[in-house]
Amino acid sequence: MLQSKSFVRKTKQGKVLKVVREHYLRDDIYCGASICKVCDTKVARLSSSASTILVLDTNVVLNQIDLLENPAIDDVVVLSVVLDEVKNKNLSVYNRLRALCSNTLRKFFVFSNEHHKDTYVKAMVGESPNDRNDRAIRVATNWYQHHLGGGTRVLLITNDKENKRKATDEGIFAETVETYVKSLGQPNLLDLVVHPTSEDVSMEDVEDLRPSKRKVIYIEHKPMSEITAGLHRGIYHQGKLRVNRYNPFEAYVGSESIGDEIIIQGRGNMNRAFDGDVVAVELLPKEQWHEGKSLSIAEDGLLLKEIYGDIKIQFCVLDSSSHTKGCMSMRG
Ligand SMILES: [Zn+2]
């Protein structure tokens, strides 16, 4: 089966070229499970006694490689889409993952989901590459579950809140790294788990039993009435928080009242808010804005552009249904 991707490109001379890339899809790619009745099991790497087979998302590989190298984690499917993303983002982690896949003592199997006719997914109109890849991971997980049947649980491991929600909606077993590791009943493994970033599942979802790790203490939420009054008086600005995908320590709040984006730096300042949450923020005094970044104020003094720095925030997290999750006051 042949899929072709085409796009138009303009040359330096101004000519418009149509570029067609051919992508062959196959139906002879094996699943790697020894118990499979359909595939050739000579190349199988996943153990016949495995009751659970894990599929990892890219961030789990990037963030949890120390954990993955522990022999307690085995019977893992490494999707080619994940392998490619890891290669592009961190070569050292990529090499460690490849070493796991080629280690005969371990049970890591590389599955070419991008070349399998049942698991290849085409980007939808308006879909970002990240969303497309997350979807490809879910499609492959679902394929494994149906391919292997009910005797084996195929479990997607993801700390991405949105991906996990979509997986569950689609009937896929999905767990966070922490939940899965806890289910193994080996408390020492928890020390290898790297904690989620703000765009991932919340710390509250992940009850951490290790006293040494209970260091992040968030400042108390403010009452909703106070936040509402603050918004009316123009002290607080409301908008949707968007976490920088490549830097979890930076986020933006597009504010209508300011007419531009407010930049929030540091996870402390984002305090328990997720990407997509509606938040209320209070600006730091102007003299505390970081210099060196453009800062423009219109003549009437109202339009602020590109505010950098640790912003003093009275932080109110309203979720999508507008119920308050609570508000908090933050230090700059
Ligand atoms: Zn199979």
Image: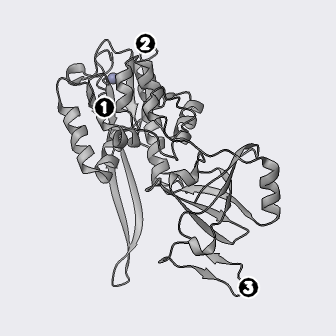
Q: Is residue 33 left or right of residue 118?
A: left
Question: Which residue is more in the foreground, 122 or 139?
Answer: 139
- Where is residue 323 shown, x and y percent of the image? 76, 43
- Where is residue 202 shown, x and y percent of the image? 55, 39
Q: Amino acid at mark 2?
A: Gly
Alpha carbon of mark 1 to alpha carbon of mark 3: how far? 56 Å
Residue depth check, mark 1 versus mark 3: number of the one nearer the observer: 3
Q: Earlier in the sequence, mark 3 or mark 2?
A: 2
Q: Earlier in the sequence, mark 1 or mark 2?
A: 1
Residue depth check, mark 3 versus mark 2: number of the one nearer the observer: 3
- Where is residue 192 shown, x and y percent of the image? 34, 32
Q: Quadrant of residue 7?
A: bottom left
Image height of 78 relative to 303, above or below: above
Residue indicated by mark 2:
151
Question: Which residue is more in the foreground, 15 or 85?
Answer: 85
* Residue at screen point 57% across, 54% down: 269
Regarding ligand 1, which quadrant of the image does it lie in?
top left
* Residue at screen point 36% across, 65% down: 19
- What coloring was used for the rendering? one colour
Residue indicated by mark 1:
68
The N terminus lies in quadrant? top left
Residue depth check, mark 1 versus mark 2: number of the one nearer the observer: 1
User: How many marks can you see?
Assistant: 3
Q: Amino acid at mark 1?
A: Leu
Q: Secondary structure at mark 3?
A: loop
Q: Earlier in the sequence, mark 1 or mark 3?
A: 1
Question: Which residue is more in the foreground, 213 or 251?
Answer: 213
Q: Is residue 125 left or right of residue 14?
A: right
Residue indicated by mark 3:
300
Question: Which residue is more in the foreground, 295 or 148?
Answer: 295
Q: Amino acid at mark 3?
A: Asp
